[in-house]
Image: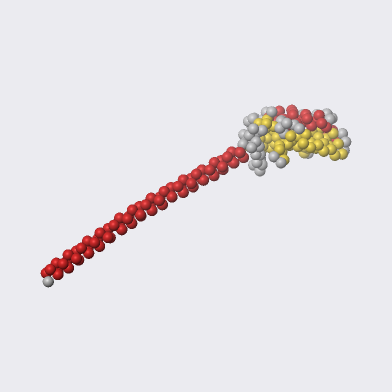
Amino acid sequence: MKKLLSTGLSLALALTLAACGTTTKPTADAGAASSENVENTTTENVVEDDKMDETSANESSADAAETKATEGETSNIKFLSIVDISKKALDLAGNEGIVTKIDLDKERNTYVYEVEVEAPGVEHEIKFNAENGEIVKHEKDKSDDYNEIKAKTAGIMSIEEAIEKIKANSDFTNPFVHSIELDEDDNLVKYEAEVRSDSKEYDIDIDAKSGEVYKLEVDDDKFFDFDFDFD
């Protein structure tokens, strides 16, 4: 009986030890596998994060390049002055002509000066390339306004004199006059001009004879997006 118990106990102990041995080995293997999976997952995540960072960096570089290109679109452009364009217009229309309007504008990625000249029996509408002065367009229309305009503008200062008067205004710093037009208001002949100074847009009206300033105000409704230099 004791032998059987002893044998039984021995067998039970052996089975218990065998069971414990069997359980320990898979646990170690499972732990190793789990560690390997964690390591692989971590590596994959790091690689994925690196790819995402690289993609994000590339997108940021592309955005920066696009912004830089947009901002620098006109930074190296040099425009002719309104005085230069006025002389070219009169050479084309005839020295008897009267320049009534010059305006800098942008058409199809090309900067142009739009000019109106009143001459005997004809009105000229001319567009010049703002960079090199080449004629982009020249139209002529019959007109009977020359004599009337000539009488009303007798004794006024030239566009060149008006530009110098405007630029001398103490409110401006390195001003660029990009638009000027002859107009009449209550029998007062005046030059109406648009000026860019210190990244602001100004409207200024001066007496075409005396040069006296009748209006000077910042125009908040306009956004002049030309970034330029001029001759």
Q: Please, is residue 192 above or below residue 34 in the view?
A: above
Residue 148 pos. (x, y %): 85, 36
Query: From what the image shows, is residue 139 above or below residue 33?
Result: above
Quadrant position of the N terminus in the picture: bottom left
Disc tally is 0
- What residue sits 33% from the left and 56% below the top? 30
Residue 58 or residue 206, whichever sits in front: 58
Nearest the eye: 134 or 79: 134
Residue 42: x and y in percent read 40, 50
Residue 73 vs residue 7: left or right? right
| Residue 220 visible here | yes
Judge from the rendering whether residue 53 lies leftward or rightward of residue 93; answer left or right. left
**Residue 121 x/y as whole percent:** 88, 36
- Identify the residue at the far bottom of this view: 1
Q: Which image quarter holds the C terminus?
A: top right
Does 15 appear above or below 45? below
Q: Pinpoint residue 117: horizontal percent, then vertical percent.
A: 81, 35
Compare residues 129 and 62 and report the one nearer the observer: 62
